[in-house]
Structures are given as C-alpha cells and as structure tokens.
Image (cartoon, grey):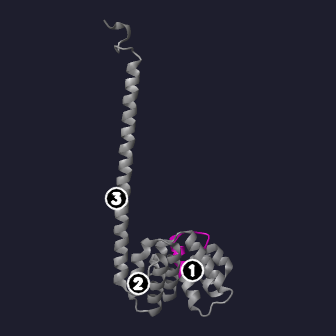
C-alpha cells in the first residue's frame, strides 16, 4: 500500500495496522507525514480513547528516531496549526536545544495557539521562561552559544595543558632512562676502556 493510502487509513479509519507500518521506519518523509497525520487526528475533534494511543505511538516513534529534522520542518506555516503545535511538543521532549532558533519565529505567528505553544515548549526545553518575547529568546540563544564556545575553548585549553604535562612526564622519563643506561657502563661511562 502507498504512503498516502496508509496515511488515509491512519487518519480516517484510525487503523492500527497502518500506524504500525508507518512507525516501522525512520524515513524522514514518513516521519514528516506522521507529524501531519497527528495534526489531522488532533484537529478532528475531541480525542477519545482510540486516538490518544495513536498520538502517543507517533510521539514515541519520533522521539526514538530523534527526528529533529522532520519536526523542525513541520514548524513551517505551510503545515496545519495542530501539526505545528504537536511538533513543538515533541521537540521540547526531545531535549535538543539546537531547535531553539527554529522554534523562536513561532512566537510571532498569526495563530495564538501556535504562539502560546511555542512559548510553553521553549520554556520546557530550556528551563527558562521569556514568554512571547522573541527578542529575549534570541538573546538567550546567543548567550547559550557564546557560553558553549567559551566552554569549548576552556575545554580545549585544558586538553592542551594535559597533553603538554604528559609530554613533559614522558621526556623526563626518557631522560631518566638515558641516565640509568649510562650508569650501567661504570664510572667512566665506557666500562673498562677508560685510562
């Protein structure tokens, strides 16, 4: 059966067989389609006991696949609001703060639900809360990146210092071994060949 056919069965018929087939792959186009399908299931109305396990299975599969790329792609205004809100929620669970700059523009979206979801999930992802203030979120991310750069520089400096200390210990040991070997030749250093 085609991807479109399986998605139709999942969304329209709530087919668990289609869900199982779709969640058996980590193909990015299928993952993007699953996010859109989750949005359609959410938009269809009140979630009942049959729909919540479908959404949870999709969410779990996206997390297992670490599907940051398809989730970020799903934030596009070309997708439905429910799909974008769903993608935001999974991104916050994924815990990858490199998604922050992709989430920030949604704070300025035309849809209030998307704006609020972006603010909520940015806060959940980062453990900071700047509400709907996109400028403060951008500043936060810049500081985060600068902090990482400073940390990486410190880490590199520490690594170089350890390497230099290791080389110094190695040179000292080689020198000690050289003197120890020289002592094996007697007082004159040349055994019985001295004067």
Q: Which residue is labeled 2 in the image?
A: 130
Q: Quadrant of residue 189?
A: top left
Q: Would you say the magenta stretch is mainly helix, strand or loop? A: helix
Q: Going by the picture, which residue comes out furthest to the front?
A: 187
Which of the two discs, 2 and 3, labels the residue nearer the N terminus?
Answer: 2
Count of numbered circles on the image = 3
Residue at the spot 38% in from the left edge and 45% down from the top edge: 163
Residue 115 position, x and y percent, is 44, 88
Q: Give how far across and how far down residue 30 sits, in percent.
A: 54, 74
Mark toward the viewer: 1 or 2: 2
Mark in front: 1 vs 3? 3
Q: Position of residue 192 (x, y in %)?
A: 37, 7
Single out the residue that lies furthest toward the top: 195
Pointer 1 or 3: first along the chain = 1
Identify residue for label 1.
4
Q: Give, as a single range, the part of the protein colored magenta.
A: 23-35
């Amino acid at each position: 059966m085609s991807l479109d056919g399986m998605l139709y069965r999942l969304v329209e018929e709530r087919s668990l067989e289609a869900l199982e087939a779709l969640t058996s792959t980590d193909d990015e186009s299928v993952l993007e389609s699953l996010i859109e399908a989750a949005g359609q299931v959410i938009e269809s109305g009140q979630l009942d006991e049959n729909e919540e396990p479908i959404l949870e299975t999709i969410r779990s599969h996206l997390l297992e696949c670490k599907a940051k790329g398809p989730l970020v792609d799903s934030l596009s205004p070309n997708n439905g609001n429910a799909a974008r809100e769903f993608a935001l929620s999974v991104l916050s669970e994924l815990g990858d703060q490199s998604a922050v700059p992709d989430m920030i523009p949604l704070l300025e979206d035309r849809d209030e639900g998307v704006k609020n979801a972006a603010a909520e999930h940015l806060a959940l992802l980062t453990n900071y809360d700047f509400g709907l203030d996109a400028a403060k979120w951008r500043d936060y991310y810049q500081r985060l990146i600068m902090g990482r750069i400073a940390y990486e520089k410190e880490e590199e400096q520490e690594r170089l210092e350890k390497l230099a200390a290791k080389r110094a210990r190695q040179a000292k040991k080689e020198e000690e071994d050289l003197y120890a070997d020289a002592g094996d030749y007697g007082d004159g250093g040349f055994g019985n060949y001295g004067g």
